Image (cartoon, helix red, strand yellow):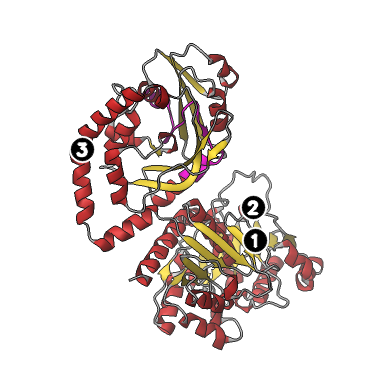
Amino acid sequence: MEKVSIIIPFYNCSYVNQAIESALGQTYPNIEVVVVNDGSTMHTEKITPYLNQIRYVEKQNGGTASALNMGIQHATGEYFAWLSSDDLFVHDKVEKQLNFMKAHNAYISHSNYALINNNSEVTVPLAGVYFDRKLDFIEHLQIGCSINGCTIMMKMEVFTTLGLFNEALRFTQDYDYWLRCVPAYEFYYLNEPLVHYRVHDEMGTKKHTSEIDFEVKAVQEAHRPVLANMVNLEKNSSAQANSLTTHSLNTPLNITFPILTLCKGGAQRMLADISNGLVDLGHNVTILMPPQGDIEYDVKAKITRTPGAVITEQDYPNSDLIISNFYSTVPSAAAASAQGKGVHARFSLCYEPVFLPEQSVSFQSYNTTPYLLVISRYQQELISLLHGIKGEHIPIYVNPNFSKLSLSNKRKPFTISAIVRIPEGGYSWQRDQDYLIEQLKVVKKQFPSVRINLICPPNEFAQSPTLQDLRNKEGFLFYSPKDDYELCAYYNRADIFVTSSIYETAVLPGLEAMKCGAAIVCVYAGGNTEYGRHEETCLMSYRYENRLGEDIIRLIQDSALLAKLKVNGQQEAEKWQLSNSVAAFEKACYSFLQDAHK
């Protein structure tokens, strides 16, 4: 986890304790707060209560640039953030902005901000300047600084490349530095107010107006040739390339997802995680859901419940994009799009005609829009073959909640785990769950000391006589994790994790268990070949070979192969990052819009 260094220059400011509190109160855990006392003669006592929580540096008065440079030299983080002693960070500023930067592979980012008064009351909720095009951003920098320095977050290596702030500039060191950065780095803008900028009578911009004006003119003149050249280059770029680049960097989208439920499950997890990731990137996301829909994942998007039990086209708000998913969400999304409420794209998390009834309906749903997103190459090829549409590939991922934990292995029995779901009343034949249980019984009979854990959502176990019989009559151990953290612990306790699905566009649980250190034994399901390679990252068999139990037994008896698959599987799972999936989804959204508006 990368460390973020928050530098707070301090000179005779009565608000410094509030600034420190806002820095220490960040939701992101790996921070350090560096307070640089720039020769203050007042209010130093307000720092004393925090000395055991901060890195404190004293120096002779030399101005903000010198204090920032001193803080940077004492910092140990990979990322730099600057907080003026009279301003405040929003509690999740660091977390949101760091996730935003990682998703965009950014070196520098800045955000919107709010204005507050002496009493820390918000007077202007959105005070930042938003530019739709990179050209507009550069042209504005020619005449003034539109970037609030306290909204900046950037990688420390930028200072290694470009040097530190110019200490000869007492008031415009930030403007000068951004102008030094802009030819070398893209500035990514998160359109969310993450800083509260205090307007008060003692602020430097009010007390030193004439000096600031003089420095501004000097800075602009020094950078004028480089900025003029950048403006010309932007103007000469092709309109198509320029449109896509500026849209991708700066324009927040309004996106509506019609979703029937967000109960526990791989498809629902992806919908929740992707929509959350889009919110983190600054987009406005609405989830349209009927009143009976469950929400069992944390959701950052706006939830709008429909008045009726079925989503209709009248329920949709106006959006840039409408992203349907399960086949029954497609008709209303297509109808809403036809009414001008947004471009309709389909996020296909499974290919329903293979395993659901009403194939004539679900098959035709793929002929509704050319804009398609899929989650595996296998699925992409299947739909392209059957419908002539090549969907944009959004890779699966492992949610960051899942990782290898340092659990004690003292006297731990050899453990096999698998996920089971309610068989009554659902369409889940593709899981081949009867086969799974049959094969686990074979293993249990041959190795009675082996522990077999079956993991199931709590509400499904309570409703399923079949699953209850497996516990009460067959002696299987059942666990119902209430959240990801408990599920992660169960994955970590497994030596072997087993999946029996014979058709899945992607199999998330197997990849999650890999990340947590389990060896995988599985049946070929199509989508699991993205990360599963037989005898390299897993043991995989075709269903007709009927050897799932044999493969489990093979790993119980071959400790070297078991260890190899655990190590290789974990290394493979590390590659599948949520940030990459969200970035691919965002890129596809912009591409769809550009194509639709040709």
Q: CA distance from mark 1 to mark 3?
A: 64 Å
Q: Is residue 77 covered in magenta?
A: yes
Amino acid type at circle 1 is Ser
Q: Residues within 10 Å of mark 1 (few under 14, many from 20)?
A: many
Q: Amino acid at mark 2?
A: Arg
Where residue 515 appears, x then y in whole percent? 53, 54
Neighbor class of circle 3 (other Cα within 10 Å; few <14, some 14-19, many 20+) is some
Residue 317 position, x and y percent, is 55, 66
The residue drawn where x is 28% and y is 21% is 168
Earlier residue among tags 2 and 3: 3
Observer-nearest of 480 and 150: 150
Instruction: Determine contact: label 2, label 1, CB under 8 Å.
Output: yes
Residue type pointed to by label 3:
Arg
Report whether 154 appears left or right of 24: left
The residue that disc 3 covers is 224
The local secondary structure at tag 3 comes to helix
Question: Which residues are the magenta region?
Answer: 69-97
Q: Which residue bears the numbered disc 2?
A: 493
Is 220 situated above or below 484?
above
Between discs 1 and 3, the one toward the N terminus: 3
Residue of label 1: 417
